[in-house]
């Protein structure tokens, strides 16, 4: 889990792919929210994060702050 928008160097991205890691990057809106608001929202997203993590590897996903009817995460370039 990362709040840095997964802005990684080419070498860091290659390591993620090489080792089959799945990355979840929190959308930039997360950084401006109070701690307990972020915690509550992360708990809401947690079942979705676990489901995606169980079925993928070598991928990166953006976790938006608001669910707004979203049931899945947006895949981003790893």
Image (cartoon, rainbow, N blue to C red):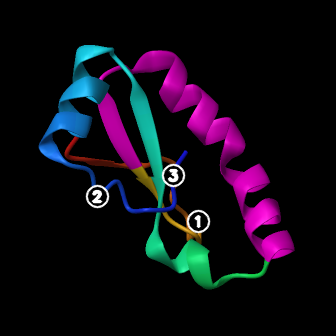
Q: Which callout, 2 or 3, points at the residue further toward the start of the chain?
A: 3
Location of residue 55 with respect to 67 vertically, above or below:
above
Above or below, 70 relative to 59: below
Mark 1 vs 3, N-terminal side = 3
Q: CA distance from mark 1 to mark 3?
A: 18 Å
Please give the residue where the numbered disc 3 appears in the rendered image: 2
- Observer-side mark, 2 or 1, equals 2
Task: Say which label, 2 or 1, has the lower sequence index.
Answer: 2
The stretch drawn in magenta includes residue 45 = yes
Where residue 13 appears, as percent x and y from the top left, is: 22, 37
Q: Is residue 21 left or right of residue 36?
A: left
Lateral position of residue 64 relative to residue 17, left or right: right
Whether label 2 touches label 3, CB < 8 Å: no
Q: Nearer the viewer, mark 1 or mark 3?
A: 3
Q: Quadrant of the C terminus?
A: top left
| Range covered by the magenta-colored residues | 35-61
Point out residue 22 in the picture as x, y percentages from the top left corner.
41, 29
- Quadrant containing the N terminus in the rendered view: top right
Local packing at callout 2 (Cα closer than 10 Å; few below 14, some 14-19, many 20+) is: few
Q: Residue at x 45, y 18 (%)?
A: 55
Q: Which residue is mark 2?
A: 7
Q: Is disc 2 placed on a helix, strand or loop?
A: loop
User: How packed is label 1: few (under 14 Cα within 10 Å), some, or many (20 or more)?
Assistant: few
Quadrant of residue 30 in the image?
bottom right
Q: Percent from the top left, x then y, of residue 2?
A: 51, 52
């Amino acid at each position: 889990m990362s709040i840095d928008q997964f802005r990684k160097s080419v070498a860091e991205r290659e390591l993620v792919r090489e080792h089959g890691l799945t990355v979840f990057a929190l959308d930039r809106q997360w950084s401006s929210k109070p701690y307990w608001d972020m915690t509550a929202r992360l708990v809401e997203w947690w079942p979705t994060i676990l489901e995606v993590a169980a079925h993928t590897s070598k991928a990166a996903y953006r976790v938006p702050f608001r669910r707004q009817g979203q049931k899945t995460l947006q895949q981003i370039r790893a």
